[in-house]
Each structure stands twice: as structure tokens, then as C-alpha cells.
Amino acid sequence: MAMLKDRGGNFGMMAALATPLILAAGGVAIDLANMVTMKNQMQDAADAAALAAASALAAKTPETPEKAKEIALNFLKAQSAGSASEGWGESGGTGDAAFKSASADLASDDAPPADEATVDIIEGSNGATGKTFKVSIVNKHTIEFNAMTRLLGQKWTQLETRATAESATETKNALSMYLVLDRSGSMAWKTNTKNTAKSSCPNYTESNWGKYPNLAATSPCYVTKIDALKAAVKDLLAQLKTADPKDLYVRTAAVSYNSAQDTAGNLDWGTTGTATYVNALVATGGTASGNAFKTAYNKVTAAAENTAHKAKNGQVPTKYIVFMTDGDNNNTSDDTTTLTWCDTARKNNVQVYTVAFMAPDRGKALLKSCATTTANYFQAEEAADLIAAFKAIGEKASAMATRLTK
């Protein structure tokens, strides 16, 4: 009876029973910390591999999606190898769902599954000629638990990470652009730029304009404002043509005005019709911009424009009006009419660019108020300034769009 009542060995028995549990708990803590690190590394590798493949597809570096898959897998393998040198095979990481993934993947089979990575690419269309790509990666990696964790009967777990990246091949913005151009008599006046192609010519100015068209030729010959305008428009149209050589995205037209609106051009694909229209302009008459701007607005916002683009390139086009003058309207009522339609264009998301070419103060004020933003207003005092202004407009309008997200 005395031996049965003796409790002197209980502590040793309890310690013997508790030690495996304590060791197992310590092992679990170590393995969970390792899993957190490992899954973070795996997620970074998957993200980088997906983005590498998507970027390559957007840049058209691989010829086929199959080659892009090879890029992703090789990139993933290289990243994994780099992490392995720092203990990838023994420690790892997790994203937000590390513990959930670990507990779900716990298994007790003797043979752990092999590491596995799969790449899936979905290809779609982007406008008339572009393509979109969605790259999805699933990365699986098995880790074996340490000896202490194995006391609980679990030998390994498999972690899984997923990554997605999207990209698109470069494509052009669909646009409809209408030019509103002043061809009043003052556009026949000279600029300060010499015309080296001619030794002499009639150099009209405000002071001798009453002698038109019988002014005697003098030397040197200077570029007229109307010729500077034609050169500037030519440069703008060339940029649009370069951006859209197959006439799939760009529609243009022009309307000129002096004391009344001239016959308006119809929006059409490419730039040929607009170039022909502008090259035929002759500077005569007074200045009245109201009806011409109204016509441009109605043409560019017509439902037929969206329909035409939808059928050819699948896009809703950006609408532009480029409004240029070198003087004041003869009647202030035309200022009011023009500004009314400028406000209407602004409210309906039409981008209005304005160019005041050697214009007086009232003309400048009209164009400043008409432009969609202050950045859309240009003031040109020389032929070179006019060409630069139209070039800047062309660069903005013909800008190409590309998208790459992770």
C-alpha cells in the first residue's frame, strides 16, 4: 500500500508523456514559419513569371503563346532555383491564405507529390489588329516537415500559389478629327518666313492689301499664312497616316470659312480627302467662324461616326475638332455662336484644339475660351510656330495605347 501511495515518480512519467508533444509543438511552429516564408517566395516567383510572359506577348517577342509558356516556366524555374539556394526546399512562404492552404493540403501518404507548375494563356482581340492576353500560373511545391512535426503523423504538405497577368499588343486609338480652317483674305498676307523656293513674289500685308491681286512682286519672297497652314496640316495628317497606315482607325475631314462657311467635307477613312481639300484653299473674303464650327461639331458627333468605327475597328472613337483662325470675326455675333458650340463640344467630350495664328487680341481670346483646356490652345506668331502647333496636336491625337497589368 505504501508503494501505491508513493507519487515520487509521477513527474518523470508526465515529462516522458509530454516531451513528444512539446517537441511536436516546437516543430509545428518552425514549419509554419518556414511555410510563410516559402509561400511568399513562391508567390513572388509566380507573379514575376506571369508578368514576364504577358510582357513578352505584348512586345511580340515570342511568336506563339506556346513559346510564352516556355518563358514563364523557365522564369519560374530560375526563380525557384534561386530561392532553393537560400533554403527553398526546406523553407517557404505564403500569401494571405498560407495557413488555410497548408491545413487543406496536409497529407500522410509516404510518397509526397512532385512539384508542379502550369501556365494557361487565353488570347483575345484588341481592336481591328491587336490582341489581348491573359496569363494564369498555378505553382505547387511540396515541403517535408521536420522530425519533430512528424511526431504528429504528418510528413509533408503541398503549398499552392496562383498568379495572373494581362497584356495587350500595342494598338491605335480610334479617332475622328474635323478641321475648321480660316481662309479669309488676311491668310494671303506674308509671314516673316522667307520662301526660298522663289526669288520674288507679291508680299501682301495689311497695309497694301487694297492692291490685291495686283501688287507688284518684291524680293525676298515670304511664305504666306495660307501656305504655312497647308504645310502645318500636311504635317499633322502625315503623323496620323504614320500611326494608321492601313486606314483602320482614323477618319478625318475639313471645313473652311471666310465670311461664310464653305462646302464641308465628309469624314472618311484616312487623310487623303482632307489633304486634297486643304491644298485647294484660296485666301479671300472676311471672317465668320460660327457656322463652320457648328458644322464640324455635328459631323464629328453624328451617330454614323460611332457606327463606322464599330464596324471597322470595334472601338468608340475619340472626337477632335481643330479650330484655327488668324483674325477676328467680322461680327461679334459669330464669336457668340462659336463659343456656344465650343461649350456644347466640351460638354459632349469632344476634344477641341485651337490655334491662333498671328491673330489679334479678340481672335486670341475667342480661341482661348473655345479650347477644351488651356493646354489645348496654341498661339503661333511665325510659320514655324504654326507647324509646331499642328505637329503637337497630331502627336497627341495619334498616340498609341497599350495596357499591361498585374
Image (cartoon, rainbow, N blue to C red):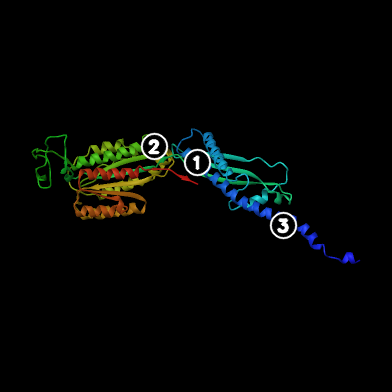
Quadrant of the drawing holding the N terminus:
bottom right
Find disc 3 in the rendering and name its residue: 22
Counting residues from the start of the chain, the first of labels 1 and 2 encountered is 1
Residue corresponding to mark 1: 52
Residue 377: image location, x then y, percent: 28, 51
Residue at image position (35%, 49%) is: 350
Q: Distance between the Cα atoms at labels 3 and 2?
A: 72 Å
Q: Are marks 1 and 3 in contact (CB under 8 Å)?
A: no
The amino acid type of the residue labelled 2 equals Leu
* Mark 1 or mark 2, whichever is nearer to me: 1
The kind of residue tagged 3 is Ile
Cα separation, mark 1 vs mark 2, equals: 30 Å
Q: Residue furthest top?
A: 63
Asked whether the residues under the numbered discs 1 and 2 touch, taking CB atoms below 8 Å apart as contact, a structural biologist would say no
Under tag 2, what secondary structure?
loop
Name the one closer to the observer, 90 or 176.
90
